[in-house]
Image (spheres, grey):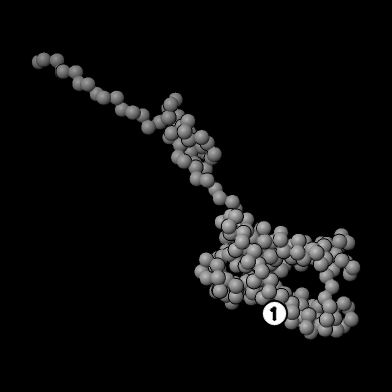
């Protein structure tokens, strides 16, 4: 019986990296590792600037969306106002002064102010869109601008309105993707909802002699 003929078996390339060890899971995904030096590692996607997705959503019914966003804008602002009052930065002398009949001030806070300030906010965000397309950066810039503008009337007031205008700007930018007109109406409604409680407190205080 003749001996078996030798068979040449081509070498099989190992799927393992050099050294024969599989990288730990922390290095295989989600870790900022240079993949050019280790081609077996998957590419790590670049993470964009954090964006508060809830503020940009447009799939929530407006009957729930307006109160929800109103709570997000109003509650932190009230907490900040209370903190500033406790530190002495927000006092009777430093709070904003409203001139005119209380009922007209009340109507201005819930009707006139939301309409005018939303239109100006939309113009600011439109101009800022030429500098950056990132919605979060635009909303932050808008909040800073409105905080500075309100600080011209009362310094502490500008601190308390910066956060609400960040929320208003996010809401406008989120709805602007659907239509500018709808974005304006939703942002105006949210701004008016936000102002209702302060306006009612002002009206009661004005007629009761507290303010």
Quadrant where the C terminus sits is bottom right
Q: Which residue is mark 1?
A: 111
Q: Is residue 64 visible?
A: no
Compared to residue 22, the image places residue 112 above or below, namely below
Q: Position of residue 35 (x, y in %)?
A: 48, 35
Q: Position of residue 157 (x, y in %)?
A: 80, 65
Say which residue appears at 37% left-offset and 32% top-offset: 15
On screen, residue 160 versus residue 137, left or right, reads right
The kind of secondary structure element at disc 1 is helix
Q: Position of residue 115 (x, y in %)?
A: 67, 76
Say which residue appears at 72% left-offset and 67% top-offset: 75
Q: Is residue 142 visible?
A: yes
Q: Position of residue 102 (x, y in %)?
A: 81, 82
Q: Please identify the quarter of the rendering in which residue 200 is found.
A: bottom right
On screen, residue 147 versus residue 32, left or right, reads right
Say which residue appears at 9% left-offset and 15% top-offset: 1
Say which residue appears at 54% left-offset and 39% top-offset: 32
Q: Please identify the quarter of the rendering in which residue 171 is found.
A: bottom right
Q: Nearer the viewer, residue 97 or 54?
A: 97
């Amino acid at each position: 019986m003749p001996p078996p003929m030798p068979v040449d078996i081509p070498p099989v390339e190992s799927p393992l990296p050099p050294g024969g060890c599989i990288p730990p899971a922390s290095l295989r995904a989600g870790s900022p590792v240079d993949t050019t030096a280790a081609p077996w590692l998957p590419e790590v996607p670049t993470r964009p600037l954090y964006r508060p997705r809830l503020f940009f959503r447009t799939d929530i019914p407006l009957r729930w969306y307006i109160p929800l966003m109103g709570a997000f804008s109003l509650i932190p602002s009230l907490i900040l106002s209370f903190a500033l009052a406790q530190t002495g930065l927000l006092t009777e002398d430093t709070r904003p002064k409203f001139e005119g009949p209380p009922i007209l001030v009340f109507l201005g806070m819930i009707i006139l102010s939301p309409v005018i300030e939303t239109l100006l906010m939309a113009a600011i965000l439109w101009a800022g869109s030429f500098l950056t397309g990132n919605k979060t950066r635009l909303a932050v810039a808008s909040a800073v601008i409105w905080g500075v503008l309100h600080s011209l009337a009362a310094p502490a007031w500008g601190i308390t309105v910066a956060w609400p205008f960040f929320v208003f700007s996010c809401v406008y930018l989120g709805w602007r993707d659907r239509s500018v007109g709808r974005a304006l109406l939703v942002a105006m409604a949210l701004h008016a909802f936000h102002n209702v409680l302060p306006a009612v407190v002002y009206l009661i205080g004005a007629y009761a002699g507290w303010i």
